[in-house]
Amino acid sequence: MSLYRLLLKSRYLINHRSNPSSSIVVSFHNVAQNPIESSSSSSPSQYEDDIPNPAFDNHFINPTTNTSTTTNSPLPPRQPHAPTNYYSNRPPPQSQPPDYNYSQGNYSSNTTGQSSWNNQNPPPPAPPRHYQNRPLQTQPQDNNYLGQQQSYSWNQSTTTQPPQYSNYNHGQSNNSWNQKPTQQPQYNNYSATTTAPEQNPIANNTPPQPESQPQLTNNHASPPPSPMRQYAFASAEEAAAERRQRKRRLRIEPPMYALRRDQPPPKRDPNAPRLPDSTSRLVGPRLNLHNRVQSLIRATDLDAAESLARKSVFSRHIPTVFTCNAIIAAMYRAKRYDDAVKLFDYFFKQNTIVPNIVSYNNLINTHCDEGRVDEALDVYKHILENAPFSPSPVTYRHLTKGLIDAGKIGDAVSLLREMLNKGFGADSLVYNNVIDGFLKLGDLEKANELFDDLKERCLVYDGVVNATYMDWWFNQGKEKEAMDSYRSLMDREFKMTPATCNVLLQTLLKHGRKREALELFDQMLDNHTPPNTQAVNSETFTIMVNECFKLGKLSEAIDTFKKVGTKINSKPFAMDVAGYNNIITRFCEHGVLAEAENFFEILTSKALTPDCATYRTLIDTYLKMERIDDALNMLNKMVDANLRVVANFGTRVFEELIKNGKASQCAQIMTKLGERDPKPDPPIYDAVIRGLCDVEAFDEARNIIDEMLRYHGGATPALREYVCEAFGKVGRGEEIEKQFTTNRSAQFNRPVNSQFNSQVNRPVNSQFNSQRESFDAVGEVLIFLLLVIPSIAGIDLLCS
């Protein structure tokens, strides 16, 4: 028995055991008459020219007896795969199967029955054998498999439907079926002649009649089934998800040179313009530096922030442009315009930091507020000529406002036209500046002309322009025209930002239209549906609360602060620290400390942290009302929160506390401040030490002097003289002199920075150390040769 028959029989036994209820009959008759079966083994040459049968998996064919075995196996079906061409590179067979006449194009069957091939319908050429290059179709289609490669013997009651593939229509045939598979791979349509599909005998579960379905003899066996191709993805959705994940990974992962520490990054083109820092540079030590500067700015300690930013330029990690912009903008907000200009020159002209458009906008705004419009225009020209970026709409806002304030409205209009010619969109705030300039000059016609131009260019414009018209009409005493302008804006139903609505609120409240302001405020609360729509902010509540305090309605101010929208979709506003600081400050100004403390407790109970302004307001109020213990407790909370105590505030508070008998508590707070970074400023130490000497707390003063000398390295001559005189009055002058001298000698003998020295003495890289050792060895060899070779040469000369 051949190996192929053993495989067939084992397949039959497995299927029969797995589903014994189904009637499965496999015909093994005519074995002796079959020439293939008579041989001991089936040679591949007997069927090497056959086309691989894709339906071989489920509709199993016995090649030796021309009978079909259709199983209803419970085993899972094979994965769909494209047929593989096994013989695409083989030469044509030398011997053809005996039952097929290739010259005549028909079968010469040795059994009774008509052949499906005849001379009138020659067989089409075999389909191409490179099946693996054909794309698979994911959706099943109605296909007919018309071919006479096998003969079928139907003898079963329950059959499973074989998989359907593409049309292999090799001519007129009575042996066909037409049925819909569930999920099977579809291949290309290879149809030489068109035949009408007949009724599917499998779908009807009835065997075909011998009259209409003659048996065909196929004495050459089919090739083995093609190997199963494994798919990487089960569906197209998984493949698309993998592509998206790969693209996301390529965007997120750093470049390869960043992972290879031994290779330097690619060299920058020296001719390419230097670009400003991106946000990706704000990481690691640079981010820590930025946060420290920002904390000092929030604590209003601008001098310390400026000093830290200036010193960091000479460090290993220079500050980014964002840190420089933060300190420059803080100087501008504090109206320290000269310091802002000096910092710009220091960072971007004297050093290698590249400014961005925000840096130039800060400088232009500073020059305009100082009245130096010509210098601001020079900066604008410098951006156009040298900067690797274009001006922003904010640039034109600052310039137009500065030109109008300087009385150069013609230049402002020219600048507006230049902005439009450069391709920028019509910015409402730039138009608003020019319109406001014409309204102040009384030229309503020109202002209306610009407003019409803005409405033609922008379907949705900023309502600040209407607020400008309203303010001008109110100042002219024409309330009707002012309210008409307001209603025309509200009728458009623009989705306005909180900044725009806040300007409208301020204009209405400024001119006594409180009812309309309350209606607008309620409308903003109703439209507040975060995260989709942010209709209000803390400044909105600040405007309304301050109006209530201005009118002396404290209870109404509390209700306004807690007010929410009435619509179903509206959500309450999550108040931030700035809103709480404002209402606490207003209550402290009116002397209602109970309500201020209540709101402070609410602030601390939420996921918010009070800032320096909150603590300073309460401490100053406590000291003003002579509640020394409450002020001391609040100062302790401020220090525990690791907030910065600036020099002017700390000096004043510590002096008041020491005068009121809290010297020892102040010494403890100073010790606590010295344990944190940044250290207290020298003026605070000076005030505390003088206060302790005045109340004769010399032990606490000596400890604070030791801390000051240890952290800051010395004391001013005035403070040293004052302390020595105070200690000398009680007979402890030599003691304090010795302390100053000891600390000074230790200061000179001690290294400036032990950490720096340890970094200098510590090997930077073991590879560098090994190279240095090898260089030392080579140097020793060279010195030896230089000393030995001349002596040898001299000996040779003497011997000669």
Image: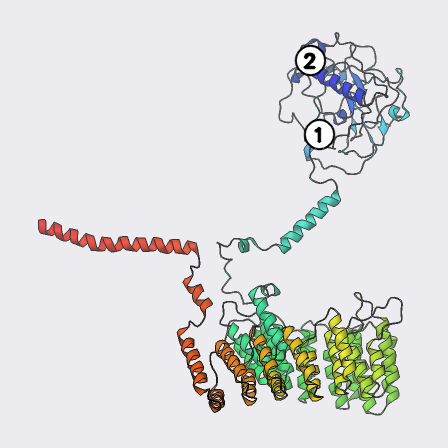
- The amino acid type of the residue labelled 1 equals Pro
The residue that label 2 is drawn on is: 2
Question: N-terminal of the two: label 2 or label 1?
Answer: 2
Residue reaching furthest to the front: 731
Q: Which mark is residue 456?
A: none
Q: Residue 49 at x, y = what percent?
A: 68, 21
Indicate whether 229 appears above or below 678.
Answer: above
The image quarter containing residue 572 is bottom right
Q: Does residue 748 appear anywhere in the picture? A: yes
Q: Indicate left or right for 90 with 164 as reference.
A: left
Give the camera-side residue of 236 and 223: 236
Q: Count neighbours of disc 1 (C-alpha within 10 A) and say few if under 14, some if 14 to 19, many if 20 or more.
A: many
Residue reaching furthest to the top: 32
Q: Are marks 2 and 1 in contact (CB under 8 Å)?
A: no
Q: Residue at x 75, y 30 (%)?
A: 78
Say which element carries label 1: loop
The image quarter containing residue 35 is top right
Q: How is the image coloured?
A: rainbow
Say which element carries label 2: loop
- The amino acid type of the residue labelled 2 equals Ser
State the quadrant of the N terminus: top right
The residue that label 1 is drawn on is: 83
The image quarter containing residue 277 is bottom right
Q: Count neighbours of disc 2 (C-alpha within 10 A) and say few if under 14, some if 14 to 19, many if 20 or more.
A: few
The Cα atoms of the two marked residues, 2 and 1, are separated by 25 Å
Q: Residue 715 at x, y = what percent?
A: 48, 83
Q: Residue 771 at x, y = what percent?
A: 38, 54
Q: Residue at x 49, y 57 (%)?
A: 264
Q: Indicate left or right for 483 with 371 as reference.
A: right
Q: Indicate left or right for 464 with 227 as reference.
A: right
